[in-house]
Amino acid sequence: MKQAQRLKAVRYDIRGPVLRRAQELEDAGHQILKLNLGNPAPWGLATPDPIVADVVHNLAAAQGYSDARGIYSARVAVAQYYQTQGVTSVRPEDVMLGNGVSELIVMALQALLDTGDEVLVPSPDYPLWTGAVSLCGGRAVHYRCDESAGWQPDLEHLASRITPATRAMVIINPNNPTGAVYSREVLEGMLDLARRHGLLVFTDEIYDRIVYDGALHHTAAALAPDVPMISMGGLSKTYRAAGFRSGWLAISGFSGRDTDYLEGLQLLANMRLCPNVPAQHAIQTALGGYQSINALIRPGGRLYEQRNHAWERLVAIPGVDCVKPEGALYLFARLDPTVHKIHDDERMIIDLLEEQHLLLSHGTGFNIDTPDHLRVVFLAPVDVLDDAISRLGTFLADYRQ
Ligand code: PLP
């Protein structure tokens, strides 16, 4: 049986051959140290008890379908959250819940794209964005984020990528995989381009509360209330509830008459009936309650200390450098090509896996065009990170392609 032709253009390499090889090694009895997924709970970063308790409390009442957009109380909570971030226009009717941001990314693009339509996507990106654009028949046109400028988007390059076929711009802030938190100036520059070219903005802000060293996350919709925008967030990272599959989108900047796209989005929401109902009950408590994430991201907190420790160990490896992330859960390290001559970074990650039983992710899996980066997830405790980075150092010391 043949797969759909449409899928031939879809890439999602970070869960591709590398993961299959890891599975084979595990099946053969090897223990693999996996620092490849932004999945907090398995590392003892558990979902806060009150959030779990809310789901349990509501389980019996969550047996039926909900409104296709999601339960009202959760949508109120999301609307209020955006209001506190300065996006004053968002009402519960402007909120749609989903089975994670992942589902909403696909829905939001499906509702927009016709064959050949172009979407501006950052490079590097969280690769679901590129994959989902392709899945919907569109073309992901990558704009450069500048490593020498702390991975901030390069506005000139972004502007040069706009064509008459461009429909939308994707912003991932704080960014996966780079950990960059965009400055207000850069964000305003991006939003101004969207405004001038009539582009819909998709802003993926799932890491908005995971920032370090006093970095300030600016909510894009608050900076450009007039620009049509779909803002996304969810429970997977800040609330360590990735398995609940619970996320949201908020609609802003559409004029009252500009309803066509939104009707398409509603159609798709209706067709999947509704998101998982028990997990929707977690949202109100998560957003409105005690923000336990704050204790993890400040000095002394686990995420803060793990980030520092892993970064220090990583950049101490000869020929490795890394912009210190200001947000999210990842280190996106560069292998100096004059020291490490890598032609195929996916091969390198498989070789690392086979030799050291350590699973990381290769840079080109995040849609950069040079094979000289890798991503380390720093959710593990420091002793585990130590062990992992020692293995990486040993591997790189005599690795040649
Ligand atoms: N967006 C970004 C930038 C991510 O890094 C991830 C997961 O790693 C997602 C979306 C997917 O999130 P969810 O678990 O809500 O589907």
Image (cartoon, helix red, strand yellow):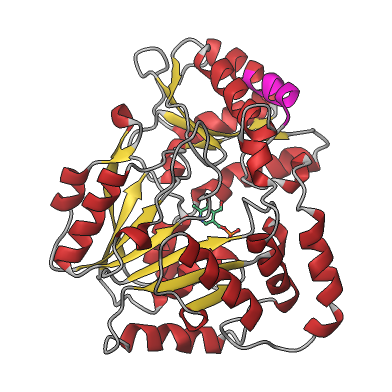
Taking depth in this image into account, of 66 and 57 the one nearest to the observer is: 57
Residue depicted at 18% across the width and 53% down the height? 161
Q: Position of residue 380 (x, y in %)?
A: 70, 33
Relative side of 161 to 9, left or right: left
Split into quadrants, the picture shows ligand 1 in the one at bottom right
Q: Is 386 within the magenta?
A: yes
Q: Which residues are magenta?
A: 381-389
Quadrant where the C terminus is found in the figure: top left
Q: Position of residue 293 (x, y in %)?
A: 65, 45
Residue 398 visible to the viewer: no
| Quarter of the figure with residue 287 | bottom right
Number of marks: 0
| Quarter of the figure with residue 153 | top left
Residue depicted at 35% across the width and 69% down the height? 229
Relative side of 62 to 222, left or right: right
Quadrant where the N terminus is found in the figure: bottom right
Q: Is residue 68 above or below residue 222?
A: below
Q: Main secondary structure of the magenta part?
A: helix
Taking depth in this image into account, of 91 and 396 the one nearest to the observer is: 91
Q: Position of residue 220 (x, y in %)?
A: 36, 57
Taking depth in this image into account, of 7 and 48 the one nearest to the observer is: 48
Q: Is 308 within the magenta?
A: no
Residue depicted at 47% across the width and 34% down the height? 326
Q: Is residue 260 above or below residue 331?
A: below
| Quarter of the figure with residue 200 | bottom left
Residue depicted at 60% across the width and 71% down the height? 77
Q: Is residue 12 above or below residue 166?
A: above
Q: Position of residue 237 (x, y in %)?
A: 62, 51
Residue 97 visible to the viewer: yes
Taking depth in this image into account, of 391 and 27 the one nearest to the observer is: 391
